[in-house]
Structures are given as structure tokens and as C-alpha cells.
Amino acid sequence: MTLPRSARVALVVATLAAVPLAGCGGGGPATNGPFYGGSGRNWLCSPAESPDKVYTAGGVWAIRNAGPTAVIDNVRLTHLHGLRALDLYAVPGDELTGNWNGIPSPSELNPGVQWFRRQRADGARIPRTPHGQVVGLVLVVKLLGMTGSADGLDIYYHTSVGHYLLHISNGLALTTARKPGKCPP
Amino acid sequence: VAIASVTLLGMVFMTSLPASASSAASARIGSLSGQVALRGRVTDAQGHGVAGARVDLYAWPASWPGKQVLHRGERVPLILVGRALSAPTGAYAVKIAAATRLTAAANAEGVVNLQAVVMGAPAGGFFEFPRRITFTHVGPVLAGLWARGAARRIPQSKVFRVSRSAVQSAAARKDFCTVTNTAWVQNYTKEMANVDSTFMRYSGVDAYAHFETSTNTTFSVGVSGSGNKGSFTASGTWSFSSTTGYDFGHNHGPSAEHYQMEYVPSEYELYYTPGYCFGYYYTQPSAQTGGHGLQFGIAIPSTPTQYCVQETPNATWYKASTQATTIEAGLTVSEIDFTASAQTGWTSTDIIYYENTDGSYWHLCGVLDYPGNDPGRVVAGLP
């Protein structure tokens, strides 16, 4: 489950700035844009191997674009605490990356995951999603303490028509305990 | 009674409406006024448009169903919220003309049950559907319960297939009547309804469910002109806000189970003012008993490998669905031969959990999409 050096460097170079950490969405952008994804409230509550190891959440958030090409302006984890977001990618394909302790090597991923076409989520250009395809949002995070969580994602994006916000109420909770305990936390 | 104009496809009809329809509602409520709640066509059996049919739209009071102790013959005061006449093509569009009353009829979750009746139609002229009053950045919207995004604003549609001669006879005589109320006739035998399901293909996973109070579950409505056994057919849906919740216990994989709650189906009858009308009988749940159950050994649905997601060891996955989940077996009303297989329903805000117990990587698969989106059903384990 190791990543080739080049890919690992790319991940490490990723900065906190790539994923704004606060999620106090304003009232500006419209919520009826062409992106869609999520449904109801979902949580993945998982043990992480240890605080100093990273966790790859690549099966929690998946979006599709029903309109013209859009550009993601930024993505914010909502109600984030106890986690350090290292990077966030938009990965197209017809399968999701899945969730991993550590960072998977590309060879470990399902063949339907087009990892080679990944983009840093902030600034990613997302064309209309063809039938059967999806854009997975792959978050690489690290625990800052014993527990950490975020209860969703705010995706700010724009098209030639306007600026939009998609909120996905899919949460992620990590713990160093062997079992996740109460879920959602 | 105020007089308001109803514009329909270029024609203007003067129509009586409740006094509150013309009252000064607040801006927040008032912007529901004029929104199309129901549209479609009134046709004859051959599909040709029927002109001049009057479609009335009523709202059930917020205190119904499930919040009242029912007595034989007790009458539910339905609230007229809109009215339309069909055009020569048979097309109609019922706009909300009583926004204040409509808003008052919504339950705590904003859900309101609406009932449309084509006056003078001896059959095929009855339809129920729930909507949710949702507040958006452009104001309140009468939205579909389960649709997402822009689709939520699409009005409910319904094609009424009715007797041309009966409807036009009423129109020609201008002898339309009005629904004054609906009366509870009787309760049928209590029935279990499936409110959710979990499926595990292997032994390393537990699953359990929690059904929440105030969950809106939508059931098909059985409608009949006579009320006789075997004469009920499904037409529209009815939203029931649950009065009791329940924590179902853990189930160990491999296993597949329906989680069930118990409801009381009831028969109702429409009452009219004098005029050219035909009665309707219909059946829908009137109460939830608090009873619950599990049904094991059900078939595991197939899941495309594409919609399977790897999860980490010892993880728990939680889903509180607010989307439609088809209930394969709704309420079976044996007394009137209204069969469960003809019914579909949907539930929301029920919660299911899948919990890995063997400490290895595992998979969750959706039937229709990824588990975190709108999967329909979720199955633990690769196909």
C-alpha cells in the first residue's frame, strides 16, 4: 500500500491551503447548480491506524455535473475539528477510490478509477459527467489528536452561468481507538 | 367568499375561493400564491382531452393523519387551496390560491397532503399526493418530497381518465358540487409495512436500523367508486408522519432483513355539497400502532460492482436517508383485496448502520448509485 515516490511527493507538496478548513458558508451562491451528489446524512466512522499516519477518504464524496464545464473555486470541510486536511483531489472514473489506511498506490486502485486524470480539487475543471461516470473527491487527512471529524463538504464552483454551492452532508470521523464508538460522533 | 380570477391557457374563469385566499398574507407565505401545484390533462378513455372539467385541490389539516382519535363518521374538514378548469385540449393547471391556509395545513416537517378531485367524474377523478413547503433563497416553494435539485420544483402531474359524458354533463349544467369533508368509515386489520432493509453477503459485518419519530413515509392510496371489495385501485400517494420510533437490534451477516413498523389502514369517504357529484371511497393509513417486526430471508438485490466502495477495517457506516426508498410491500388490506404488491411507498430519515466486525477491508455496494449518494438499497460485501 505504498505510493511511488513521485506520487508521494505530489501528495506531500499538497498544502493546507488547498483545502480551506472552515465551513461557515455564506448566503451568496445559488444551491441549484448543475453539480449533484450526496443524499441525506451519511457518516463513515473509522479507526485510523495511528495519529501520525494519513487516512485516504476516497469513498465518501462523489459528485456529477449535469451542466456545462464548471470550475471548482474551493472546497471546505464543514465543522472540521481534530483533522488536518493534507490534500483533496477530484478523480474521475466509473468507480471510486475507496477508503484506505495510508495512501494507496495507483496499482492498488480499481481499474475504473482514473487516478492519472486527477486534479487538485480547488481549481479543478469538471466537464459534464458522462453517463456511468462520477467524480470522486479524495481527501487525504491526518488526525491531530485522538479523534477528529468533519460533517460534510461545501463545494463552491462556477460555470459560465453563475456561481453555485453544493453541500454534501457526508461526514468523516476518525479515531485512534480500535473501534469508532458512537457514530456519528 | 371572495371572488378571484383563475387564468387558464388564455381563458379567464371567475371562481369562488375561500375568503382567506384573498387575505393579506405575509410575503413569506404569499409567494406560494400562484405556484402551480398540480397540472396535467383530463381525458376520456381514448385519451382525448375533455374540456370544462373542474379540478379542485384540497389540503388535509396538519392534525391529520395519526394525530386524532377517530370515531365512526368523524369528518375531516378539507381545505380548498386551488381550482382549475380544463381547456379544450383537456390541459389544466391548478395554482395555489390559498397560500395561508395551505401553509397552516403543513406538518412540522413542512409536508402537506393534497387531494385532487375532478368534479362530476364517477371514476378516475381522485388523486392524492404530498408536497413539502421548502424555503429557498427565492422564497417558499411547493416542492416534491423526494425529488432533488431543480426537479423538486416541478409540479405534480396527473392525467385524469374520466367519463366525458359525465364530466361534460356537469359542466353544461354548471352544477358542480364541492367537497365539504371526508369521513372516516372504518379501520382495517393492522398491517406491517417495510420501512427499510439491510443486506449482508458475508459474516464480517453487523447491520442495524433505527426508525425515527416524525419520519415521513409515503403510501399508495387505494381508490374506489363503490367501496366494494376488489374495486380499489392505486391512485396517488399519502404521506404519514410517524408517531413512534424504534431501535432495531443488531443482525449478523450473512443476513438480509426487512425492518417493519405497524400501521392501521382505514377507509374514508368523500362528502359533497349538493350538486352533480359522485362519491369516492379510499384507503390509506390513519394511525401507527408502535408495533414493529423483522422479516428475514429476503432476497439480496444485485449490485453493480461499479457502485461498490472499499471501507476500512472496523469502520461503521451510517446512513440517515432523506431520499426515496422503495418499500416493496406496502400495506396489505385483505378486507378489500387491495394487494400489497400494487403498492409502493417511500420513507425518509430512517437510519441504517453497517459495522465491520472482522477487522479487514470490506465493501459497501449500492443498487442504484454509490452508498453515499442515492443507492436505493445498500448491500455489504462484493457481489
Image: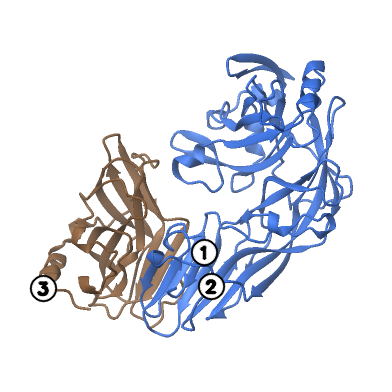
Chain colours: A brown, B blue
Report the residue at 87% width, 50% height from top: B71
User: Measured from the top left, where is residue B42 in percent x and y?
Assistant: 67, 29
Which residue in the protein does label 3 denote? A5
User: Measured from the top left, where is residue A78 in percent x and y?
Assistant: 34, 57
| Mark 3–mark 1 distance (CA, rounded to whole Å) | 40 Å
| Mark 1–mark 2 distance (CA, rounded to whole Å) | 8 Å
Secondary structure found at label 2: strand
Residues at circles 1 and 2 in contact by the CB criterion of under 8 Å: yes
Residue B64 in view of the camera: no
User: Measured from the top left, where is residue A91 in percent x and y?
Assistant: 26, 59
Which residue in the protein does label 1 denote? B377
Q: Is residue A53 above or below residue B373?
A: below
Q: Chain of mark 1?
A: B
Residues at circles 3 and 1 in contact by the CB criterion of under 8 Å: no
Q: Quadrant of the C terminus of chain B?
A: bottom left
**Label 1 vs 2, first from the N-terminus:** 2
Report the residue at 53% width, 67% height from top: B301
Q: Is residue B121 above or below residue A3?
A: above
Secondary structure found at label 3: helix
Which residue in the protein does label 2 denote? B199
Numbered disc in front, either 2 or 3: 2
User: Which residue extends farthest right?
Assistant: B72
Secondary structure found at label 1: loop
Neighbours of disc 3 within 10 Å: few (<14), some (14-19), many (20+): few
Q: Are marks 1 and 2 on the same chain?
A: yes
What amino acid is found at the position of numbered circle 3 in the picture? Arg
Residue B208 in view of the camera: yes
| Mark 2–mark 3 distance (CA, rounded to whole Å) | 40 Å
Q: Is residue B81 above or below residue B222?
A: above
What amino acid is found at the position of numbered circle 2 in the picture? Phe
Report the residue at 51% width, 76% height from top: B200
Q: Chain of mark 3?
A: A
